[in-house]
Image (spheres, helix red, strand yellow):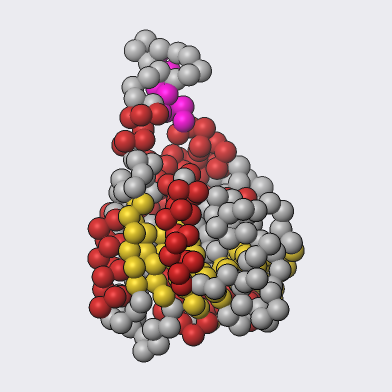
Amino acid sequence: MEPTRTTDVDIGALTLANGERLERVVQRVTQYGEFDTRRANAVLVPHALTGSSRVGDWWNGIAGPGKLFDPTQWCVLGVNALGSCYGSTGPASPAPDGAPYAARFPIVCVRDMVEAQQRALAALGIERLAVVIGGSLGGMQALTWALEYGPFVENAVIVGAYDAFSAMGIGLNAVARQAIYNDPGFAGGNYPPDLQPTQGVRLARMIAMLTYKSDVLFETRFGNRLDRAGGDPARNRGDRFDVEGYLAYQGDIFAKRMDANAYLALTRAMDLFDVRECSPADRTPRLTFVGIENDWLFPKHYIERTAARYAALGYACSYHTFATGHGHDAFLAEAEALAAILAPELRLQTTRPA
């Protein structure tokens, strides 16, 4: 699915939650479809850790022709997150002195990302979101939208995320970041733009992939089979099992497209996420939470507990379990199955545009 248009929106200076300031912030907004006459059909899709504003590239089981959010009926919007490396302001962007921010890029949190998105959408004349939906880090953003901009949002769908990141999640992120720090090419974050610390990024991705999948999936897909490329790990230390080859492949392709400092910035934003003390008076948005079976990065019992807490606070709130053996990444890998769970809920709560 090709975008209808992509726009870089300059929102000016942004004061961050920690008090630091970015002098000039750009948000890349990608649009699929058009607004209806009432401009009441906007769907915002915040992305997860490694995504971009191009929703059609990574969630075409949710947004696309004939899908849950068909661009002939909905105006689907993606905004590249603050701190990322796919068009919005991030560590690889030029600072006021013209050089990349690199290690000087300030620490950002999910609330900063959402404020930047809101300002960009407002600059484009978008005053209402029928739905904001995201998974993982995207789910954190969707929940923040509901809490910080309640009157702006009709429905918030939070998939594979809850109201505060866990100690286990923070620890896993820390190990992945350490892989980048240990790469000699990292240079304290001030590496040349064309000389990424690729080995560190590659290892970070391999570690992270273990958290995105499940034991059930790995056992079914790989077991203890030898690498399909051949070799004998019983005789040669450099030869691999099939799962090792898979992780290496994932690391290789990721290292070609991810800026190391952006990875550090976004994982730290995940670590900092905690909205348990946020209890706004406005409870306009309907909240839909989805917990994923066999997800050990965002265990579903945390999500179910979060949904119960918001229901007790007076939100119209529901919880669904996504039955899958895939693990956390099921919201991407099995997106059409997720859409089947969400479709009845959204039909009840949202009037689809004519």
Q: Position of residue 119 (x, y in %)?
A: 60, 80
Tell whether 283 sits left or right of 75: left
Tell whether 303 sits left or right of 114: left
**Is residue 267 depicted above or below 9 in this figure?**
above
Residue in front for this viewpoint, 80 or 124:
124
Report the magenta residues as a range.
236-246
**Is residue 293 depicted above or below 351 in this figure?**
above
Q: Position of residue 67 (x, y in %)?
A: 58, 54
Q: Can residue 101 be seen?
A: no
> Residue 189 magenta-drawn?
no
Q: Residue furthest top?
A: 235
Q: Quadrant of the C terminus?
A: bottom right
Residue occupying the point 29% across, 68% down: 306
Q: Residue furthest bottom?
A: 281
Q: Position of residue 298 (x, y in %)?
A: 33, 55
Q: Position of residue 207 (x, y in %)?
A: 40, 42
Tell whether 306 sits left or right of 93: left
Residue occupying the point 36% across, 35% down: 217
